[in-house]
Image (cartoon, grey):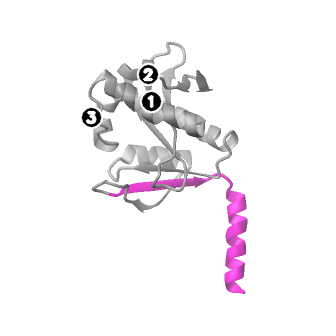
Amino acid sequence: MRVLETDRLALRLMSTNDAEFMLQLLNEPSWLRFIGDRGVRTLDDARAYILNGPVEMYERLGFGFYIVELKKSEIPIGICGLVKREYLDDVDIGYALLPQYWAKGYAYEAASAVLKYAMDELKFKRIVAITSPDNHKSAGLLEKLGLRFERMVMPPGAETQVKLFAIDTEPDVLRSEEKADQTSILS
């Protein structure tokens, strides 16, 4: 089922039918380097990953990671979506594409659609994202989307910190609240 569409892309719910694609994506060297090894080595592992991750999150929260596919051909090229990690206060946006689809504007197109959906439809006030400290391309994309670096965070069980980026979806409200806080501090 399609959740979002852009000019060139369709974002749809993930299912166990996507196991072969996810097995490939989860074992790409770029995924392993920047996101981490999920221990998915077989089609059964991939099906379990899909059911215990994205599908479970759809059922529990109504959102998750979506398969990104080329709209005309329906060829899957990556994933993009929202996830609620227990160690972060806010929902975060994430994306990963197969390397042959990098540098074509697809990640920006998909992430822009997800960010708009998160703000307009799901009414999230704040969205965050995390990246490896050396994933400069992903950090650049987050900045292009309007997210700003806030701080380093240590995910549970990780050996290194990750960069946390954030965007407040109601900046005017926040500016008013910040002004009120500054006024009360000065009083």
Where is residue 63 shown, x and y percent of the image? 57, 36
In the picture of the structure, the residue carrying the numbered disc 2 is 16
Report the side of 95 relative to 29 (left or right): right
Where is residue 140 shown, x and y percent of the image? 44, 47
Where is residue 124 shown, x and y percent of the image? 64, 48
Report the side of 166 relative to 23 (left or right): right
Q: Is residue 59 above or below residue 147?
A: above
Residue drawn where x is 54% and y is 45% of the image: 145
What amino acid type should be assigned to the residue bearing mark 2? Thr
Secondary structure of the residue carrying numbered label 2: helix
Q: Is residue 90 above or below residue 67?
A: below
Which numbered disc, 3 or 1, marks the residue that appears first in the sequence?
Answer: 3
Q: Is residue 78 above or below residue 167?
A: above
Residues at marks 3 and 2, CA–CA distance in whole angstroms: 23 Å
In the picture of the structure, the residue carrying the numbered disc 3 is 29
**Marks 2 and 1: in contact by CB < 8 Å?**
yes
Report the side of 182 relative to 1 (left or right): right
| Circle number at residue 51 | 1
